[in-house]
Amino acid sequence: MTTTVTFKGNPIELQGTTVQANQAAPQFELLNGSLEAVTLANFKGKTLLLNVVPSLDTPVCAIQSKTFYSKLQNMPVEMVTVSMDLPFAQKRFCGAEDIAMQTLSDHREANFANNYGLLLPNLRLLTRAVIIIDANQQVKYVEVVPEVTNEPNYEAAMAALEQC
């Protein structure tokens, strides 16, 4: 299923087929701050919240990332923030905000963006989304935020986590 979002009110069709709840999680390969590959297999047996943002250097993305980081501190959930930012920019953001949040970059090949159907093609950015994958690597929750400049529904994501 192809999804259309708006960016500052302008419609943009996401590239690819957007991931849906109740399907096997698509594979991905992303880079961590040490430029090492991280794949879905690294999270096998864990509940995973993918906090997907266009760029950590924007206010809404920073708010979203810090909000989820704060809410998940005492929960048995792995949180990963995924963006097209370079790993160095992601590391700089975490240092400036003094948070030990795990960040992964899709900058090199847009592998995650294409496999999850979350690429804003003309901008070469990820759209704003929240994806929850359970310990069996099944997608349990997907929110593609309709307007990229808005925050996600934190309460709905937290409620979905409680079901995992």
Image (cartoon, rainbow, N blue to C red):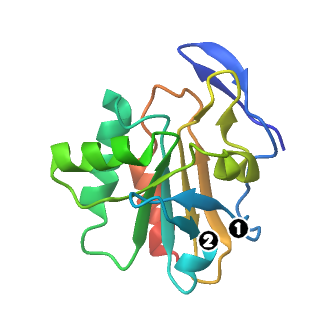
Q: Quadrant of residue 89?
A: top left
Q: Secondary structure at mark 2?
A: helix
Q: State the residue lying farthest toward the front.
A: 35
Nearest-to-viewer mark from 2 and 1: 2
Q: Position of residue 60 (x, y in %)?
A: 36, 31
Disc marking residue 40: 2
Please give the name of the residue rendered at 29% of the width and 58% of the height, measured from the top-left corner: 69
Image height check: is 132 above or below 59?
Answer: below
Residue that badge 1 annotates = 25
Please give the name of the residue rendered at 58% of the width and 83% of the height, measured from the top-left corner: 44
Q: Position of residue 115 (x, y in %)?
A: 74, 53
> Are there few (<14), some (14-19), or many (20+) residues within 10 Å of tag 1?
many
Q: Position of residue 149 (x, y in %)?
A: 46, 25
Disc marking residue 84: none
Question: Which three-letter amino acid code belongs to the residue tagged 2?
Answer: Leu
Badge 2 vs badge 1, beta-carbon distance below 8 Å: yes
Position of the N terminus, as image quadrant, is: top right
